[in-house]
Image (cartoon, grey):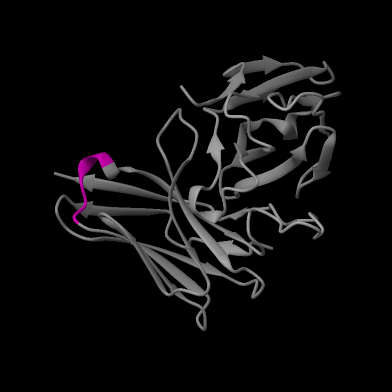
Amino acid sequence: EAQVTQNPRYLITVTGKKLTVTCSQNMNHEYMSWYRQDPGLGLRQIYYSMNVEVTDKGDVPEGYKVSRKEKRNFPLILESPSPNQTSLYFCASSFLEQGLSNGYTFGSGTRLTVV
Amino acid sequence: DQQVKQNSPSLSVQEGRISILNCDYTNSMFDYFLWYKKYPAEGPTFLISISSIKDKNEDGRFTVFLNKSAKHLSLHIVPSQPGDSAVYFCAASARPLISPPGTSTGTASKLTFGTGTRLQVTL
């Protein structure tokens, strides 16, 4: 089944403790992206990647890192999480050449709480 | 600054009637628009899209209308069904999700999302 898989689904952590949220897709998509969803703010892009070893900042990159060493994986790294990073996170992917008609495929989300 | 706005946080519609979800945008550079549907505990799923060269795109029960002069788009669901109950996000892009060869990727693949409208279809 074609899908974007995020892990973990739920995570509670303490301020300052480094964590990684994994994202993997099995569709051979070139493009991958991370979003966070917050009440009243919709989905905001954190980072995106057009292909292996190519990453760029989105709207809210502060406090986050990403890497794209393999095409299928795009982990989101919080080196020193803070409470304002408590949010619902989504990973998404798409082909670069599929055009607008198909949009992105999203993962099921990771709910992160930083205390 | 919210460039894509969905001013109605929620909407309730009776089964069989038309649901109309609205979205306004401020950035005149936006020229591709998408609608996503999101159920609880799931990621958003792509519903329908429209390019700025069109004013209407239809897919089954779902139709998206675009009024460029008013910077407004709407999603019509006819007839509404209980399974349509979800949060709907509109999203906009200033360029296609793909970049033509030789062009700068820049922000070409960035989607700007609205805040969402929760639709409830009642029996």
Between B119 and A32, the one nearer to me in the picture? A32
For the view shown, which residue lies furthest in the front direction? Answer: B101
- Tell me if residue A29 can be seen: yes
Residue A111 on the magenta segment: no
Residue at image coords 53%, 48%: A103
Main SS, magenta region, reads loop
Which x, y percent locates residue B57?
38, 65
Residue at image coords 68%, 30%: A86
Residue at image coords 84%, 34%: A63
In the image, residue B84 sits, relative to residue B30, either above or below, namely above
Which quadrant does the C terminus of chain B fall into? Answer: top left
Residue B80 on the magenta segment: yes
State the extent of the magenta-drawn residues as a range: B79-83
Which x, y percent locates residue B51?
51, 67
Which x, y percent locates residue A43?
60, 46
User: Would residue B101 appear left or right of B116 to someone viewing this image?
Assistant: right
Which quadrant does the N terminus of chain B fall into? Answer: bottom right
Residue at image coords 69%, 20%: A22
**Residue A24 quadrant:** top right
**Residue B26 quadrant:** bottom right
In the image, residue B100 sits, relative to residue A12, either above or below, namely below
Which x, y percent locates residue B56?
38, 70
- Tell me if residue A115 can be seen: no
In the image, residue A73 sits, relative to residue B62, either above or below, namely above
Between A44 and A104, the one nearer to me in the picture? A104
User: Would residue A80 appear left or right of B27 to someone viewing this image?
Assistant: right
